[in-house]
Each structure stands twice: as structure tokens, then as C-alpha cells.
Image: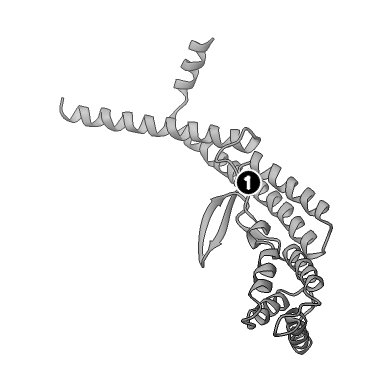
Amino acid sequence: MKKRGRIKFRKIKTWQLLVLLVPLLFVDATLLRVDHIHMTELRDAVLEADAAEESDEVIVEKLNALRDFTLSNIVINVVDDNGVERVTFGTGPFYLEHTYIRAANKALAEAEATFANDSNPNGNVYGMAGEVCRAQALANGWSWDDANYINCMVGEIQKYPAADDIQSSIMASLPSTELYRWNFASPVWAPTLTGFAILITLVIIVVILIRGLVWIILRLSLLFV
């Protein structure tokens, strides 16, 4: 049976393989696009949950769905890397800005409670910084969960030279932005419908290349006979 299969395959002409290759490439591109679109929908669901200030449990659930799909499928994506677009396998980096701001505001609120009765030479540093930044927030239309407000608070606190301990405590309590930055990588090949379609396409391309190389070698050998 194997011998018959090899004989039948050998009878397939190279031009027939080329004709078969064209629709296969179209199928591959379509399947890759479907996987990319589904990944984008899952990623958008995470970002929408973040913007809507959903609970951490809901955001983690959506993150897990995005991670599981990306890790088990071939996801080709184009990302912006410092103004230069490059192709990558995976989601590309994305940032949960609103979740970070909520966590940072919580840390600042805890710092305010801790240092509300602070008796350093400059007085209640946190309270004075809050007065300045609240006025700027009203003038500039910032909401209290705006990143500009957090940056203002940190900047104002750092203006007081006698508040080193307070600065260190507040800076240490602020969460790292890297904890809210995600980038799930996908495999180069996966055992999915897309993966097997690409595998078949690659096999056909290799066969065509080998046949072409053999044909060239035979032609060159005839020149020296």
C-alpha cells in the first residue's frame, strides 16, 4: 500500500502541485486571519473590562481566556515597536492602565491615612501635596483616578527635602507598572486546523523545490555529457 501511494504521488505533476498550492496559501492566510481576529476580540475584552473598572476576578478570567487561546494557537500579529512595525507571534504588549491607576490610588489613600498626622518640619506633606494636586485636577479637568493626578502627587511630595522617609514609603507602596503590562507569546506551530494546513503547504513547497532542484541538476549534467 505504501509503495502504491508513493507511485501515485510520483505521478502527480509539478504543475499540479503548483495549482494546488495557490488555494492552500489562501486557506492558510484565511485561517491565520481568523485566529488573529479571535485573539484581538479576547484582548479587546480584557481592555474593555479594565476601562469599565470590572473586578479583578473578571479581568483575570478574561486574561486567562486570552492566554489559553494564544498559547494554543498560531497567532501572527503586527506590533508597533518604538515607531517601527514588526511581525511577532502573540498578542503584542498591552497595558491595563485603569487597573494600575486604581491600585496606585489605593496605595496613595493608604499613605494619606498613615501620614495624616505626620509631624515633620514641613507639616503634613501628603495633605499639602493633595491640596496642590486637587486644585490642578479641577483646573485641568482630571478625574481622581487619572494618571496625571498620581504623577502630580508624587512630584509634589518629592519637593519636600525633609520628607525622605515619606517619599520612600509612598514610592515603595506604589505598584510597579510592569505588573500590569502583559504580552502573551504564541507558538510558531500548533496542532490545530491552521497548523496542519500550514504543514501541508510547507510539504508541498518542499517537494516543488526539490523537484525543481533535481530538474536543474539534470539539465546541467546534460550540458557536460
Disc count in the image?
1
Bin the neighbour count of mark 1 within 10 Å (Cα to Cα): few under 14, some 14-19, many 20 and up: few
Q: In this view, does 205 lie above or below 112?
A: above
Q: What element carries label 1?
A: helix
Residue 204 left/right relative to 59: left
Question: 32 or 133, which is in the foreground?
Answer: 133
Locate residue 67, reporting x and y percent.
69, 46
The answer to which of 30 and 109 lies nearer the viewer is 109
Q: Which residue is found at the position 42% from the left and 33% from the top?
A: 208
- Residue at 69 percent across and 80 percent down: it is 152
x 49%, y 18%: residue:
8
Q: Position of residue 73 (x, y in %)?
A: 64, 41
Q: In which quarter of the image is the N terminus?
A: top right
188 is higher (above) or lower (below) than 204: below
Image quarter hosting the C terminus:
top left
Along the viewing direction, whichever of 145 and 205 lies nearer the viewer: 145
Q: Position of residue 153 (x, y in %)?
A: 71, 78
Q: Mark 1 points at which residue?
A: 30
Going by the numbered disc 1, the residue's amino acid type is: Thr
In this view, which residue lies farthest toward the left? 224
Q: Nearer the viewer, residue 115 or 180?
A: 115
Residue 139, given in percent of the width and then of the height, sits at 76, 90
- Please state if 191 lies on the left or on the right of 105 as rendered: left
Asked whether, in this view, residue 103 is left or right of residue 70, the answer is: right
The colour style of the image is: one colour
